[in-house]
Image (spheres, rainbow, N blue to C red):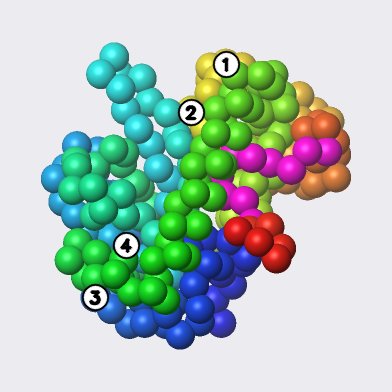
Amino acid sequence: MIDYGDSGLVAYLPQDEWRRVQETGIPVRFEPRDVLVRQGDATQHVYVLLAGCVKIVRSESDGSRAMLTLRVAGDVVGDLAAVDLQPRSATATALTTTVTRLLTGPQFRRFLTRPEFAPGFAAYTVRRLRISDAQRAALALLPVRDRLARALIQLDRESRRADGPPAIRLSQAELAELVGASRNAVVAELAALREAGIVVTGRRDVTIVDPAALRGRSHGLRPDLGREPRVANGR
């Protein structure tokens, strides 16, 4: 059975409605580094993530890039363009083998007319906006060490749910994009974590070996980068 965790669109829908979403459209599988949607494209289809992990990256006209968030099983990718019919605002790329269900724009918009679906999707969208606001605040206020610790905690949780192995499969440049820092700053902080015995690093992966010590470096605050579970007894 797939572990959808306690967040994502799946957390806001009745089980029968989530099952209906899963049974709509066609199955599509992506391998690591495959692109699901590309920034600027005029397509409207939506991917429902059933397994795997996807990074969302936005590029600017000056050539800079920022990793906005991650999406994992239970999330949807591409829904904004299906709703407002505007070009894609970011590029979604598979980090792991990713299993999806592709819904056309009209198929997804029909779900939005369903009373079993629409309130849950609205709550899910609001939650993503709140998390985005928290992420921007973290990038503006926290030092690189804290931002990196929070990001690694979140990535570790999502990578374990997405495909089992504990390694975080992001390069140092990608981690720098995620936390809004220079690559050199992230390299220095990773070196400090490695020397402290908190992480082990490879060419394109990071493994956390002392989660408690890493949480201590984020001052005990829950990570706001990426997804966040729904609050109990509320939305």
User: Which residue has dot 1 on it?
Assistant: 184
Q: What amino acid type is highlighted by mark number 1?
A: Asn
Tell whether 50 sits left or right of 153: left
User: Can see residue 91?
Assistant: yes
Asked whether 153 or 88 is in front, the reply is: 88
Q: What amino acid type is highlighted by mark number 4?
A: Tyr
Camera-nearest label, 4 or 2: 4
Q: Quick one: label 2, few (<14), some, or many (20+) residues within 10 Å?
A: many
Q: CA distance from mark 4 to mark 2?
A: 24 Å
- Point out the residue furthest to the front here: 115
Region rendered in magenta: 220-229
User: Which residue has dot 4 on it?
Assistant: 47
Camera-nearest label, 1 or 3: 3
Element at badge 3?
strand
Element at badge 2?
helix
Residue ID at (74%, 43%): 222
Q: What amino acid type is highlighted by mark number 3?
A: Ile
Q: Please tell me in which quadrant of the rendered image residue 122 appears.
A: bottom left
Q: Position of residue 1 (x, y in %)?
A: 56, 82
Q: Position of residue 193 (x, y in %)?
A: 76, 30
Mark number for residue 26? 3
Q: Earlier in the sequence, mark 1 or mark 2?
A: 2
| Mark 1 and mark 2 residues within 8 Å of each other at the beta carbon | no
Asked whether 206 or 81 is in front, the reply is: 81
Residue ID at (52%, 37%): 132
Q: CA distance from mark 1 to mark 2?
A: 12 Å
User: Which residue has dot 2 on it?
Assistant: 177
